[in-house]
Amino acid sequence: MLKLTESFTMRMGAEFHFALSDNIDNINSETTTYNTSKKGNDFLLYSNLALAYNLHYFAKDKNPGSALGSSDMEGLEYEDEDSDGVADIIDLCPFTPSTVSVNGYGCPLDYDSDGVPDYLDEEPNSAPNAFVNTDGVTLTDEEIEKMYLIYSDSIGNLQFEKSATYTADIKRRDKTANRNKGYRVVISNTTSLSSDQISRMLSIADIQSEENSQGTSYYIGNFENPIEALSRKAEIDELGIESRLVYNNFGEITDIHESEIAELNAAINPSDLNPNQIVFRVQIGAYRSKLSKDVFSDVPELLVIEGNDGLTRYMSGSFPTIQDAAKYKINLLLKGFDGAFVTSYRAGYRITLKEAGATVNSEEDIVSKEQTSGSINADFVDFTIQLGSFDGRVPAEVLSDYMSLGNVRPLRGSNGNTKYVYSKFETQKEAIDALRTLNDKGFGDAFVVGEFNGQIIPAAEAKKLKGN
């Protein structure tokens, strides 16, 4: 297409057609009328020329502006829209966030050269030439193998993995995201805790926990500012809780030296701890025997605290009001946690709900509730038989064998795998009898497991909760 003016355009074209027949013009090489006909199929050339006029009227700009001068051109030469210190004319990475450090080409720094800039890199010190994912985290051999299998899959069994996102994947990503940089206040000496020490810890609204090689660690925050972290530590110390200040560098914990803490102490503000602040929680249960965490997989921000009285307490996160805590308690009751109840704390002490401002019908005995408490509704616990576990699509022949049994259902495991289970049983004995029948049918890898709220738990755990 050729634009002649603002209103006129001209289009020219030519098409050469090869026919699959020698009879397009009704003349072929075997005709007796035209002896000069060429052998072979016909072909034809189609040429066209079109002239178009645009009927739209374009009003002239009443304020067309002035032409750019030499000074304006100089301004364009040094213009820096993202304010990273590199002129747009040579900026290879425009629109970089203003807080991000860049190199001479305007691109974010990438210390480990893994292709993911440092400000987005969740593993900033990857090994040289390491294969990483889009978050900059080194791929494991299993992940690389899965990528290759998806790439080389010729029948589509694994293609759905490209777009599938599992709940467990989201949990893993959340866990990785929490392992960012920052200062933490870590609670010291958390073994053999007394009831008073437990009450002090539970009165801290933002306390968190994580599992590590030494057991369970309890901490507060991921502070960017060390003064803010030290001020928070002072508040914790006022509760009579021993703590230490550390720096978390993507999961690597380093203690802050006393000399550095002494310098920071001069700059911290007086404690803003509100002695009248009340923290509400829901105690799910306190058990003599520690339960599997699979039982509490649907409980977010779970705190597991072991006391010197031999009890393991399972607590919810904190709530600002008793109404929020009560709603959460009702949800737990609907999930089978019959022993759940609301607790309240103030200034490091466990207080009654009446002292917390709630209207209660009877006096609350805090001491008795510190004893073994909590029960799980046995109606929510069953036995079932796990046939297999798959990280991806189940082979068609295997799925066909499962479906031939009838009463087979998939359950999503906590690790993201899909587990296929057979039927439900009230007692472990019934499940074992059914397992023998399945073994005779060729399902030799099947085994008995427990099920609670749609989650797989060990059979021994289910037997303990079920009581049979």
Image (spheres, rainbow, N blue to C red):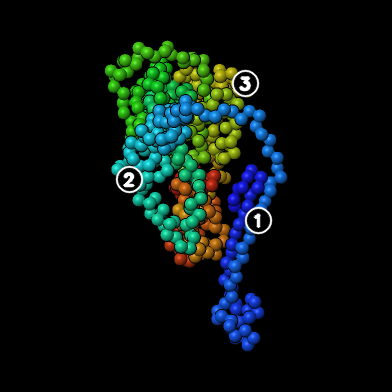
Disc 1 target residue? 50
* Label located before the other in sequence (1 or 3): 1
* Label located before the other in sequence (3 or 2): 2
Q: Position of residue 76 (x, y in %)?
A: 47, 30
Q: Position of residue 275 (x, y in %)?
A: 49, 14
Disc 3 target residue? 359
Task: Give whichever of 27, 238 is nearer the camera.
Answer: 27
Task: Give whichever of 71, 383 is nearer the camera.
Answer: 71
When the figure is inspected, residue 359 is found, relative to residue 175, above or below; the finding is above
Disc 2 target residue? 130
Q: Secondary structure at mark 3?
A: loop
Q: In the image, 249: left or right of 72?
A: left
Q: Amino acid at mark 3?
A: Thr
Task: Identify the residue at horizontal 35%, vertical 51% (top origin).
Answer: 141
Q: Quadrant of residue 209?
A: top left
Q: Which mark is in front, 3 or 2?
A: 2
Q: Secondary structure at mark 2?
A: loop
Task: Identify the residue at horizontal 63%, vertical 23% (top origin).
Answer: 361
Q: Amino acid at mark 2?
A: Ala
